Image: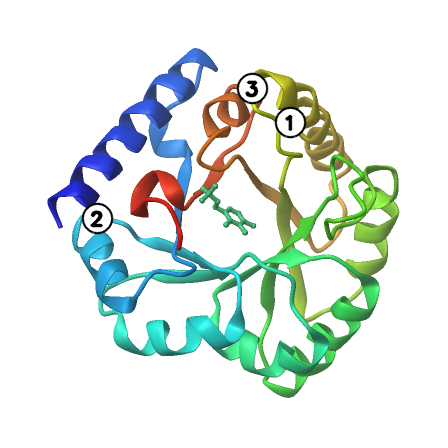
Amino acid sequence: MEYLKQNIQQIKSKIKAAAERSGRNWEDIHLVAVTKNFSAEVVQAAVDCGIVLLGENRVQEAKSKIELVKGDVKWHLIGHLQRNKVKTAIGMFSMIQSLDSFRLAEEIQKRAEQAERVVDVLVQVNIGREITKYGIDPDNTESFIEKVSSFPNIKIRGLMAIAPFKENPEDVRSYFRHLYNIFESLKQKSIRNVNMEYLSMGMSHDFEVAIEEGANMVRIGTGIFGTRQ
Ligand SMILES: *Cc1c(COP(=O)(O)O)cnc(C)c1O
């Protein structure tokens, strides 16, 4: 699977260039390879090329891959999580990037407490206020985080967003900038039990703009694995 090696190298060099344009080090940008619709075999090949962070949208689909893929890797849940799957999910993922409602936070708190764990999460923000997308309204993000910060078994470690799809990635720059501003303002507030470390934004077609606007985690599927069936 020579193409994987080439794709990963190409993505990494674009990450590096974008990081430099924004005055940062490429080592500060975390690359999450998004594995949905790709087999454990293909994922393993990517891991063998040096990928260490893997993102999956669905608990069920992730299960067999997590069992099969070998190596020092971490799995992040990046898709909407149903409350009846929380118990399974917290046993499988090192981070839930898609905390998108208070009821989900309550369920994560309950299950994490039972498992005697602290679960790392990112708060998903619906930065484009799209009815088709999950996430907290940008204006409510701070109050949401303040509420969730009282849960001892949940550790908020940053924000995640999916920008609206635009043909030209320049057209989503303002959304990324908005999220970065929210991220920075939350960081300044130093809310107890909250660590604003990760700003997860940018996918295959818009990650360079996202990095220029301050992303330090990008989630790339197509750009690494190719077009999904
Ligand atoms: C599928 C997906 C990605 C990756 O999308 P690509 O366009 O294939 O890079 C990133 N984030 C989320 C939440 C996704 O569902």
Q: Is residue 101 left or right of residue 194?
A: right
Q: Is residue 91 above or below residue 162?
A: below
Q: Is residue 125 left or right of residue 97?
A: right
Instruction: Identify residue type, mark 3.
Output: Asn
Q: Residue at x 42, y 77 (%)?
A: 63
Q: Residue at x 20, y 45 (%)?
A: 4
Instruction: Identify residue type, mark 1.
Output: Phe
Q: Is label 2 or label 3 in front?
A: 3
Q: Kindly identify which numbered label has been placed on residue 50.
A: 2
Q: Is residue 124 above or below residue 115?
A: above
Q: Residue at x 72, y 49 (%)?
A: 133
Q: Residue at x 69, y 29 (%)?
A: 184
For the residues marked 1 and 2, what is the alpha-carbon distance in whole angstroms? 28 Å
Q: Is residue 221 left or right of residue 166?
A: left
Q: Kindly identify which numbered label has been placed on residue 148.
A: none
Give the quarter of the figure containing the C terminus: bottom left
Mark 1 highlights which residue?
176
Which structural element holds mark 2?
loop
Q: Is residue 97 left or right of residue 182?
A: left
Name the foreground residue: 198 vs 92.
92
Which callout, 2 or 3, points at the residue further toward the start of the chain? 2
Which structural element holds mark 1?
helix
Mark 3 highlights which residue?
168
Image position, residue 149 (x, y; %): 77, 58
Name the foreground residue: 31 vs 225.
225
For the residues marked 1 and 3, what is the alpha-carbon distance in whole angstroms? 14 Å
Within 10 Å of disc 3 (Cα), the crowding (few <14, some 14-19, many 20+) is few
Image position, residue 20 (x, y; %): 38, 15
Q: Is residue 70 above or below residue 113?
A: above
